[in-house]
Image (cartoon, rainbow, N blue to C red):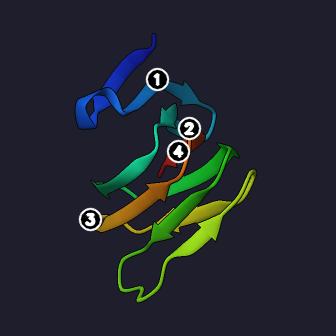
Amino acid sequence: MFKTNEYFDGKVKSIAYETVEGRATVGVMAQGEYEFGTSTVEYMTVISGQMEVMLPDATEWKTYKEFETYIVPKDAKFKVRVSGDTAYRCLYK
């Protein structure tokens, strides 16, 4: 069944589920800046809004818009900034 997750005092919320490709979450981030860590490779797709992302080893923020995907390596930290409510899907591989 589904599992709900809440981070950063409720500013990031997601629902976990299983897909034919593997475990995934869909979620929403409120305006703010966040740092996440990975334990698997993560395929992050923006569903609504946009995200500014600082990937591991990057020196500049990159903006991802609706239906764009970025990949974060396993065992890494990355930063995300959103200027308004933003929805996403994360596929874990």
- Three-letter residue code for mark 3: Asp
**Residue drawn where x is 24% and y is 30% of the image:** 9
- Residue 75, image x and y in percent? 26, 65
Q: Badge 4, how many Cα within 10 Å: few under 14, some, many 20+?
A: many
Q: Which circle marks residue 90 in the picture?
A: 4
Q: Are marks 4 and 3 in contact (CB under 8 Å)?
A: no
- Could you tell whether 14 is left or right of 50 in the image? left
The residue singled out by tag 1 in the image is 15
- Three-letter residue code for mark 2: Asp
Q: Earlier in the sequence, mark 2 or mark 1?
A: 1
- Could you tell whether 5 is left or right of 86 in the image? left
- Residue 31, image x and y in percent? 46, 44
**Residue drawn where x is 49% and y is 67% of the image:** 53
Q: Secondary structure at mark 3?
A: loop
- Residue 25, image x and y in percent? 49, 33
Give the Cα separation between the discs numbered 4 and 3.
Answer: 15 Å
Q: Which circle marks residue 85 in the picture?
A: 2
Q: Which circle marks residue 75 in the picture?
A: 3
Front: mark 2 or 1: 2
Give the Cα separation between the discs numbered 1 and 3.
Answer: 22 Å
**Residue drawn where x is 26% and y is 37% of the image:** 8
- Three-letter residue code for mark 4: Cys
- Could you tell whether 82 is left or right of 13 in the image? right
Give 49 or 18, whichever is nearer the viewer: 49
Q: Are marks 1 and 3 in contact (CB under 8 Å)?
A: no
Q: Are marks 4 and 1 in contact (CB under 8 Å)?
A: no
Front: mark 2 or 4: 2
Front: mark 1 or 3: 1
Q: Secondary structure at mark 4?
A: strand
Give the Cα separation between the discs numbered 4 and 1.
Answer: 10 Å
